[in-house]
Image (cartoon, rainbow, N blue to C red):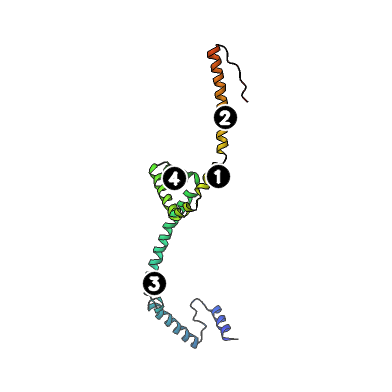
Amino acid sequence: MSRTARRAALLVTMSDSGDEQLSARERGELDELRQRVHALESAGPSGAARHHPFRSLGSVLLILLAALLAMLSVVAVWANSVVQDTDRYVATVGPLASDPDVQKAVTNRVTTAVVAQVDVEAIVQRIDLGGIVRESTVGIGSEAVDALRSQGIALDAFTAKLVDRLLFRRKPRSLEVG
């Protein structure tokens, strides 16, 4: 029987006190182990239980970071609920759009940003103003002549009706305009 098996058998057969079936050598070893355990338990914390100098500082910093992140998460959850609920967002921000001071501020900021990003001088130099006027007024002459002609025909008809009425005191004749 091996030494480990023999010790296991002894442990199984031991009584509550555990000392009845031990040999003198085993009893001495058991007493020595008990003394060591007693010495270790009464010595207090060992060298391994010492605190490192930066452990407390690190703990405080991590606790502060956790508190800061907890506060930020509360703000993030609130903002998420307000922004994703479009009706609530519009109800909250909507009155600002009708405020003249806010409109003026937004207009000024947008104008400033656009002018800062766009080279207005270069755009004005590239524009062919004469070409734009020519293209937009093509056919205006014929349109003007047509308008004058229709006005002239209507004026002729009106004049004929007026003359018939005044001179001949009769119902105006119907003129066909064509």
Residue 149 numbered mark, or none: 2
What's the residue type where badge 3 is placed?
A: Arg
Q: Is residue 26 visible?
A: yes
Question: What element does badge 1 sit on?
Answer: helix
- The foreground one among 124 and 81 is 124
- Find disc 3 in the rendering and name its residue: 55
Quickly name the residue at label 1: 135
Q: Position of residue 148 (x, y in %)?
A: 55, 30
Near mark 2 (Cα within 10 A), the count class, few <14, some 14-19 or many ≥20, is few
Determine whether label 4 and label 2 are within 8 Å by CB. no
For the residues labelled 1 and 4, say whether their Cβ atoms are less than 8 Å apart.
Answer: no
Which comes before the other along the chain, label 1 or label 3?
3
Give the class, few, some or many, for how many residues have Cα within 10 Å of label 3's Cα (few <14, many ≥20): few
Give the amino acid type for the residue marked by disc 4 in the picture.
Val
Q: Which mark, residue 93?
A: 4
**Camera-nearest label, 1 or 3:** 1
Residue 43: percent from the left, percent from the top? 37, 79
Q: Amino acid at mark 2?
A: Arg
